[in-house]
Image (tube, rainbow, N blue to C red):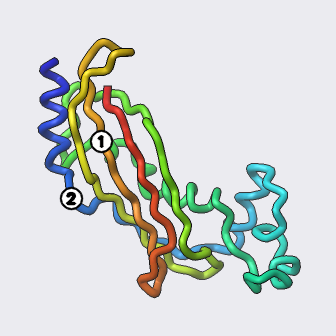
Amino acid sequence: MAQADEVLEVMKELVGKEEHVVTCQVDKGMMIKLPWAVDDPNPLWRDEKYARQTRWGGLIASPYFAEFLRFRGISNYDKVFTSFGRPLPGSPANVVGGEEVEYFRPIRPGDVITCSRRTTEVKKRRSKSLSKEVVIQTYEQTFTNQFGELVITHKSTNVKT
């Protein structure tokens, strides 16, 4: 399919380039509200008094907070489907094909977290279930704190149909 070839050519320009760089200061109030919003009862990220008694010595962000930061970095979905100001040909749909998240350090109130994304690979494949060619994008997001320490990596495979 010609459209898959066109999408592949545009997506190849992204490989190895840093994009969607977002820096934000972690707000304690938001850290505490997020677990309440998703009904996560773990007091480690909701109860400051309890958290002080743990090995962490204070509040740490829940895994949901990392997702909040991740989506904050790509919340403008026009950018997700745009490469250097050009829309992807045919405005293809995006299907998440798999994700892997690794946590290295806790996120604490007041931390300054920088998130960036880098496409590591794009390739074209024929989808048996869709009976057409699709473009598969693999990317990695990294989260570092104000000390330059790696906090989280998020790897994702997306299928552009």
> What is the x, y in percent for residue 56?
73, 82
Does residue 64 appear left or right of residue 16 in this picture? right
- Which of 140 and 25 lies nearest the eye of the viewer? 140
Q: Amino acid at mark 1?
A: Gln
Residue 150 drawn above or below residue 92: below
Query: Which residue, given by chain and number where applicable, does mark 2 sit on?
Result: 16
How many marks the image carries: the answer is 2
Residue 75: mark: none
Q: Residues within 10 Å of mark 1 (few under 14, many from 20)?
A: many
Q: Amino acid at mark 2?
A: Gly
Q: Residue at x 21, y 46 (%)?
A: 83
- Among the 4 quarters of the image, the one containing residue 54: bottom right
- Among the 4 quarters of the image, the one containing residue 8: top left
> What is the x, y in percent for residue 99?
48, 46
Residue 137: mark: 1
> What is the x, y in percent for residue 14?
20, 51
- Which of 34 and 42 lies nearest the eye of the viewer? 42
Q: Residue at x 45, y 75 (%)?
A: 150
Q: Point out the image quarter for the N terminus.
A: top left
Q: Point out the image quarter for the C terminus.
A: top left
C-alpha separation, residue under disc 2 versus residue under disc 1: 12 Å
Q: Are marks 2 and 1 in contact (CB under 8 Å)?
A: no
Local SS, label 1: strand
Local SS, label 2: loop
Q: Residues within 10 Å of mark 2 (few under 14, many from 20)?
A: few
Q: Residue at x 68, y 63 (%)?
A: 62
Q: Residue at x 30, y 58 (%)?
A: 118
Closer to the N terminus: mark 2 or mark 1?
A: 2
> What is the x, y in percent for residue 138?
32, 46
